Amino acid sequence: MAGQCAPHAMGIEATTKRDLLTRLARVRGQVEGLSRMIEEERYCPEILQQFAAVRAGLQAAEKKLFVNHLEGCATHAIAQGGTAADTAREELVDLFYRYMR
């Protein structure tokens, strides 16, 4: 699906992209650490704490990307009006519904 975008897609702002990639690299390292902790049979609460850190890291990256979409793509589409605005609003409702659970 790479390269396929909604008609109102504007891409990821350069500083946001760098920040997301940095955050994901950190999460990748945390997941690798989790594997080592499990292999070493570390104390369960320590492992669970690391799971929470991974989850928090992913949520922070997710929020950053959501803000990028809201401030860029969605705002642009809504300002255009018409079908683009309708599509953007539907996407936002769907995103809110999915992530509010």
Image (spheres, grey):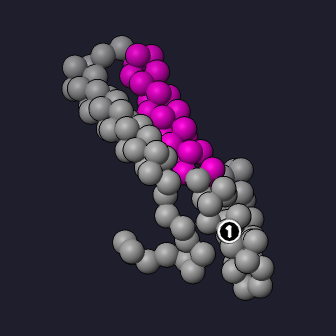
Q: Is residue 61 magenta?
A: yes
Residue 68 appears anywhere in the view: yes
Seen at 63% across and 50% down, the residue is 67
Q: x, y (%) of residue 12?
A: 49, 57
Q: x, y (%) of residue 38?
A: 28, 26
Seen at 59% across and 45% down, the residue is 63
Q: Quadrant of residue 40?
A: top left
> Type of residue at label 1?
His
Residue 90 appears anywhere in the view: no
The residue carrying mark 1 is 76
Seen at 74% across and 65% down, the residue is 93
Q: How many marks?
A: 1
Relative height, residue 9 to residue 69 (above, below): below
Q: Is residue 52 magenta?
A: yes
Most foreground residue, 43 or 52: 52
As drawn, is 68 to the left or to the right of 37?
right
As drawn, is 3 to the left or to the right of 8?
left
Q: x, y (%) of residue 55?
A: 49, 36
Most foreground residue, 72 or 6: 72
Stretch in magenta: 44-67
Element on which disc 1 rests: helix
Relative height, residue 73 to residue 33 (above, below): below
Number of residues whose C-alpha sits closer than 10 Å to that of mark 1, classed few (under 14), some (14–19) or many (20 or more): some
Relative height, residue 11 to residue 13 (above, below): below
Pick the quarter of the image with the N terminus: bottom left
- Residue found at the very far bottom of the displayed protein: 83
Seen at 46% across and 45% down, the residue is 15
Q: Quadrant of residue 22?
A: top left
